[in-house]
Image (tube, rainbow, N blue to C red):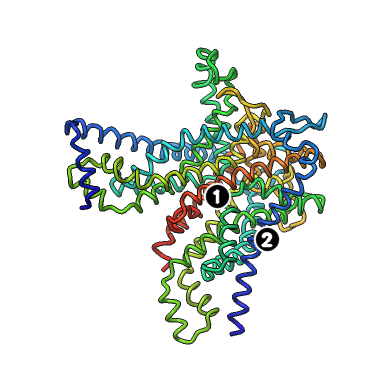
Amino acid sequence: MGGDRIFTWLTAAMGLVVIAVLGAIAIELLVGSGPVWSRFGFGFLTSTQWDPVKGLYGALPYVAGTVTSSVLAMAIAVPVGIATAVFIAEFAPRRIAAPITIAVELVAAIPSVIIGLWGLLVLSQLLSQNVEAPIVNNFGWLPFVGSSATGSDLFTASLLLALMITPTIVALSREVVSSIPRMQHDGLLGLGGTRWEAVRMVVLPAARTGIFGACILALGRALGETIAVTMVIGNTGKVPTGLFDPAQTIASQIASNWSEASIGLETDSLVALGLVLAVLTVSTVVAARLIMHGRGPAVGAPA
Amino acid sequence: MTASTIALGHLLDDGVSDRRRRRSELGWVALCAVGSALVVATLVLIIGCVAANGIAAISATFLTQGVVDYDQGGALFAILGTLQLVPLAAALAAPIGILAGIFVAEKRNSRVAHVVRVAAETMSGLPTIIVGVFVFTIIVAPTGQYSAGAGVIALAIIMLPVITRSVEEILLLVPGSVREASLALGIPAWRTSISVVLRTALAGVLTAVMLGVSRGAAETASLVLTAYGGGQAGNFGDLGSPTDSLPTFIYANSISPDPVLVTQAWGASLVLLVIVLALNLLVRNRSIGRRAI
């Protein structure tokens, strides 16, 4: 029995390593950002200043940039993702569904730095000339449009984010949709319902919670995505007021300022931003897990 | 057919003509197809762009020389950097992750296992930039320099929850009867876990590690804060010195005004994309459900 005990302890110890690493990250974020909280208190969250010269730091522009870019990304990714999931699971014949499924997995696998490179060198140029310039020139007086058409802005960043989180929504929603019992679905078809009616009346209502959880999980990814956003968002620490305004997210602010930041209150403020981001993403992911709870371990598996 | 289905059936006839219902079906199916087409189109567009621009950049020099002087030379240091960081991180994360996965799967009902599972889930939802900040403060700041070693630790932390969670899921797929049969033969529980349960799920466990590896190979943000440090030196084999890697090479070159460096970024993207997509297709072929058991 000695071997059993040793083996159990060994596996338990490795499990504890996982807990310890997470704990160490949490402690480091709390301790590292300590000076910021004692200096600015909650004012750190509401201040719009980020001025290393004056020693003033505030997180509001970055929180605003993070939330708006993610929400805009969701506005695109949720409909496209759910439509794709429903198409794969319900409508498409197998020989069409299979390659689409692979394509979705491959989109998820593209490294974010490559998506960022494409966004920076191809998409943003394209948008700036063909979409943003005409809109700004003709409708620039409308609120929430923004006045510049550089292509490095909230709009491009949101599109890239949408592209990156759509596979998450598709993969998880497809699993949920496929796991719905077929009886009512088939029954409705038998009664003369169309496939769309079966989806609308049976499948979607039953899959609603799971799909919602999938979307929240995708939101968590969008909030924390760093490199691709850093490359296209314009790196401007202002609360964005228009779609074509350059902005900055929490993650992109850390990534683009870390190497030049002087050790002290400036790096501590970046760590404090990290803490804010961690709280945002972790609470989002936990919410998603709670929503999807009871749907079995397969849902939400790392795809 | 249940009563509720029949109730739903009554809704169908709600005064809407059959032709309109068929047409509406067609419209919605078409809309869903358009959504799928969008996803496939972006994939083709991005891969096409990377392939077209990347092939132009790839040459013997690109693959066999490091950065010689500013925009002279190639991406060898970045390629070697990735080939060094990713396997080392996997070697660090895989044993811990596999054993932790075994723990969570076997002690399913214990409170500690539950906490480990929640910790792994939380960690996999944590933005990687935060892992970068963490490793910077515990390793780069005390040692006073960016280093490949710090990058390895960062990648290992990112791979760890991926491996733990996938291994757990795969082990749960192994039928209890396999384990019981082994125990009934008098084989100790620990040998049963390793030689029978783990062995049965070996393909799946390899898949789990591969998932971690492909996640690590694609990782950029945390390496910018730990291994890279803005230099482009080739310090292959020296864990104490900074190192470039394919993702950091792409990131740094992409924002350069020099077209030569931008072309190199496309070339490096092609190399990285081939590596990552190959890993993913490999994982797909060994996919968990089909081959694990």
Asked if A260 appears above or below B114 in the picture, the reply is: above
Res A148 → quadrant: top right
Asked if B171 appears above or below A178 in the picture, the reply is: below
Give the class, few, some or many, for how many residues have Cα within 10 Å of label 2's Cα (few <14, many ≥20).
Answer: some
- The disc labelled 2 sits on which kind of residue? Ala
Asked if A170 appears above or below B25 in the picture, the reply is: below
The reply to whether label 2 and label 1 mark residues of one chain is: yes
On the question of residue B261 being in view, the answer is yes
Question: What percent of the width, then of the height, locates residue A246?
Answer: 62, 26
Q: Quadrant location of the N terminus of chain A?
A: bottom right
The Cα atoms of the two marked residues, 2 and 1, are separated by 19 Å
Which residue, given by chain and number where applicable, does mark 2 sit on? A20
Res A64 → quadrant: top right
Q: Nearer the viewer, mark 2 or mark 1?
A: 1
Q: Nearer the viewer, residue A172 or B30?
A: A172
Give the class, few, some or many, for how many residues have Cα within 10 Å of label 1's Cα (few <14, many ≥20).
Answer: some
SS class, disc 2? helix
Question: What percent of the width, then of the height, locates residue A227?
Answer: 62, 40
- Which chain does the residue under circle 2 lie in? A
Which residue is drawn at the image coordinates 77% and 56% (left, top)?
A: B240
Which residue is drawn at the image coordinates 56% and 52% (left, top)?
A: B215
On the question of residue B77 being in view, the answer is no
Which residue is drawn at the image coordinates 63% and 67% (left, top)?
A: A14
Left or right: residue A77 versus residue A18 is left
Which residue, given by chain and number where applicable, does mark 1 sit on? A286
Question: What percent of the width, then of the height, locates residue B142?
Answer: 81, 53
